[in-house]
Image (tube, helix red, strand yellow):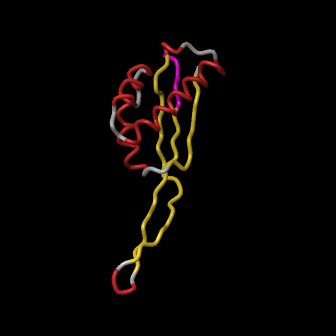
Amino acid sequence: MQSTAKLRAVRISAQKTRLVADQIRGKHVEDAIKFLAFSNKKAASIILKLLNAAIANAENNEGADIDELYVAEIQIGEGITMKRFAARAKGRGNRIFKRTSNLFIRVQER
């Protein structure tokens, strides 16, 4: 049994999100939830919500046992990048990139 959850266009860069995702890849679901709950990274709360959604999908749609689930796969990809303009001295301007990321998580029974 396996179940997935995905989230698109989250307003955080993929690089920052991958730092947290690498910490829980392959871990038991209970350990991953503990790690994410006590992490002080912004990405941790986003990934925690997505992990809980994947667990709920596994429980309700597949009838999986929660105690046997682990994080089989977690992928963080770059989403769209919003380009913005910031005024600078002497009439110049700089581009500001507001990056987003796409998250995908798959939980599976051992």
Assign the N terminus to one quadrant of the image: top right
Residue 17 place in picture, x, y as percent: 41, 44
Depth check, front residue: 29 or 106: 29
Q: Which residue is drawn at 46% across and 57% down?
A: 99
> What is the residue that sits farthest to the bottom in this orientation?
90
Q: Is residue 39 left or right of 4 when viewed as pictured?
A: left
Q: Quadrant of residue 3?
A: top right
Could you tell whether 83 is left or right of 58 in the image?
left
Q: Where is residue 106 in the image (x, y as percent from the top left)?
A: 53, 30
Check the image and report above or below for 52 versus 90.
Answer: above
Residue toward you, 108 or 99: 99
Give residue 2's quadrant in the image: top right
Q: Tell me the residue at 52%/34% (across/down).
A: 50
Task: Residue 93: give x, y in percent of width and height.
Answer: 41, 78
Residue situated in front as seen by the camera: 99 or 86: 86
Q: Which residue is drawn at 43% across and 36% down?
A: 45
Q: Which residue is drawn at 61% across and 25% down?
A: 57
Task: Check residue 57 for magenta coloring.
Answer: no
Percent x, y for residue 82?
A: 51, 62
Query: From the viewer's perspective, is 62 left or right of 88?
Result: right
Task: State which region is magenta.
Answer: 106-110
Q: Main secondary structure of the magenta part?
A: strand
